[in-house]
Amino acid sequence: MSIPVLALATDHWYDLRDLANISDAILDGADKVLPFGIVYVLAALIGFVASFLIFVLPSQLYLGVYGERKIIGRIQSRYGPNRVGPFGLLQPIADAVKLLTKEALTPKESDRAVMYVAPIIFVMPAVLIFAVIPFGPRMVFANVPVSLLYFMAISSLPVIATFMAGWSANNKYSLFGAMRIVAMAISYEVPLVMALLGAVVVTSGAPYAGDFLNGLALQDMVLWSREFHIWVVFVQPLALVIYFICVSAELNRTPTDIAEAESEIVAGYLTEYSGMKWGLFYGMDIGYALGASAFAATVFLGGWTFFGLEKWVPPWMIFIGKTHLFYFLFIWTRGTLPRLRSDQLMAFAWKFLLPLALFNIFLVATERMIWSSQDYAKGLIYVFAVVNIAVSIAAVYGWARFLGYRPENTPVRPRLVKNAGGYIPVGSEANR
Amino acid sequence: MDGGGIVFAFYVLAAVTLISAAGVLVSRDLLHAVLFLILTFVGVAGLFVLLSADFIAMAQVIIYVGAIAVLILFAVLLTPRAGRNNGETKFALPGILLAVCLAAVFLFVIHDVAWTTNDEAPVLGADQLGEALLTTWVLPFEIASVLLTAALVGAIMLARTPQEEAEDALA
Amino acid sequence: MSIGIEHFLTVGALVFCLGLGIALSKRNAIGVLMGVELMLNAVNLTLITFSRFATSERPIAGHTFVVFIITVAAAEAAVALALAVSVYRNRETVDVDQFNLLRS
């Protein structure tokens, strides 16, 4: 249960590889001078400024708003924002100013209190998620032993906020959006937890520096990938795929955003929101996607480690790079895939993802038994990785075929609808 | 459990829990009552953290807030014409009187007993919980899984529409 | 000023009694269910309190009991809400004082 002390942490405050040293040095120096524990207030300020400069500003504003629109524009053969400032770089700021000066309307028949509180409740969990994410060997705010469960718990809160938003507006389309998001959250929570269970089974209990790793703590998962020189994604490829699909469904990213599908139900739960209230929902959607990306980078992509590179490059840079890489996956699917129908998404969660997740747990539990009986041999994990990648691809393909997926029936060149057995016009010769 | 932070946190969490539990009782709108219920669950989870039961606190938030409260919201949405009134029946007064009497008895007992307690929090992690569940309490654990399966089947059977039942009878 | 076992037990008892009052007095079946959930939660709080403060050989027993209670509460909520939806289909109401088909 104890969290092992890390070898990378150095004593020199100027060692930029771990910013925790600098903040410790500043706080220790300030503690000797300042009275009454003002140093705790100072710590919050330092943390806020540092996280804003190295993470929030580049990620949320420039990858989340500008980069997303630019990349999606390029994917769809458009230019994207290019008017405000050089290369359109000032577009996020212009957007924010526009939203701030816009009037935030409240419908007359709405539930005013709930409608006012909903965006606030939506913002809180997005900030709370980052409390347990390790940015470096010592750069983790709350190193709690159940941080993986903490992430699961926090990520179930925004559903309530979106429900409040949809219901309080007293609008038919808002209520449809709320209903859809509640149904989606219940459905996709199950395979999500099952997929993460696979990653926990792999990492927990492995020996590390005379102690055992705790698979429910995110820092220990990172240490696992450093100890065994392999990322969890290679041992658990199916878990990452399931996690990605489920989390993009829970976050309402575009291929699965049936809760705010603008071609079906105006804007879903956001229909009656405007101005900065809408802006909070929009901004925090990016915040949640970044949180989910950071979590995936920690659990599946090895966090701040990079096969020994973390000794030379600041680990937090590696971590932020991995987070952005995963966030790019979100952008990519958003720009590429069309939106699914509501019932298709439900069937996909229950019929496709859940059996695969159960199969994945069965597989990884078997391997875990073999591994512990072989005294945690380091070479064995690579064998498991090769086996798992092959078995996962076979399982996905086989289960899809079992459910009726036939790639050979997909036409590769255009042919007449009539020949494919499709539409026959009324009154034609064939109908007589 | 001393320390200004713990005392402050306890009183804030207790106030949140009790006020929102009272909100479930007094709010006239059913949806507001559900939202107050969610706040109560979160407050109780905070009290679990104070009692150094991290795993139980997280399980509380995941299951109660993430599943049960969302299920209740879903049930409210699925009964659209039933009315959103969270009013009382004619047995309200005796019921609340009974609750008040019970509260008086409880408070008397709690403050009259000389509790022998230990100030050292026992170290209870998720690993010990898992070990206990799969060794000492393995039989109740299996029975609980059977119960969950039965509840799953029962809920699906209960909530079917007459059309679906007719289709299944034909098949 | 310190926080002891009495404080947590008081909160648990008050939440339990509020839940009892809700379960006994509400007209809507979903409201009654919310009262029952509150009572179960108060019991959980009490068990965890005893597990934390009591001098016992196996304090983990309290946590185990809470896990079982959470399981049963989830099953109970699922069945109860399915019942409410099923009754609503037939009667277009979920008020418990309207369920009087057996009254002659």
Image (cartoon, grey):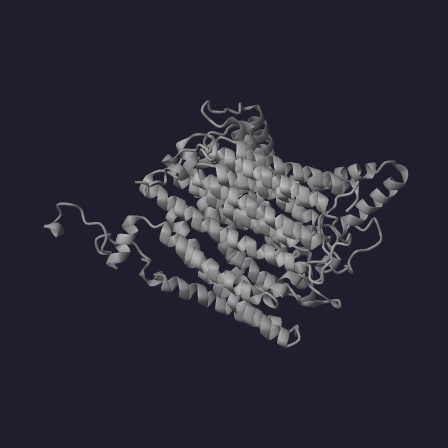
Question: Which corner quadrant holds the N terminus of chain A?
Answer: bottom right
Number of on-image labels: 0
* Horizontal side, residue A403 vs residue C44: left or right: left
Using the image as rendered, state which of residue A302 and residue B55 is in the foreground. Answer: B55
**For residue B22, above or below residue A132:** above
Q: x%, y% of residue A328?
A: 55, 49
**Residue A137 spot, x, y in % from top left:** 74, 55
At horizontal 42% and vertical 30% (from top left) the residue drawn is A171
Q: Which residue: 52% across, 40% down?
A: A160
Q: Position of residue B122 (x, y in %)?
A: 73, 57
In which image quadrant can residue A226 be found? Answer: bottom right
Query: For the point 51% across and 57% down, which residue is it?
Result: A241
The answer to whether residue B170 is left or right of residue C22 is left
Question: Is B95 on the left-hand or right-hand side of B121?
Answer: left
Q: Is residue A266 above or below residue A359?
A: above
Q: Please indicate whether residue A220 sits to the left or right of residue A95 in the image.
A: right
The relative height of residue C15 versus residue B116 in the rendered view (above or below) is above
* Depth check, front residue: A427 or C24: C24
Residue at 40% over, 55% down: B154
Decide if residue A228 is in sight here: yes
Q: Nearer the viewer, residue B168 or A406?
A: B168
Residue A112 position, x and y percent, is 51, 26
- In this view, the residue farthest toward the right is A33
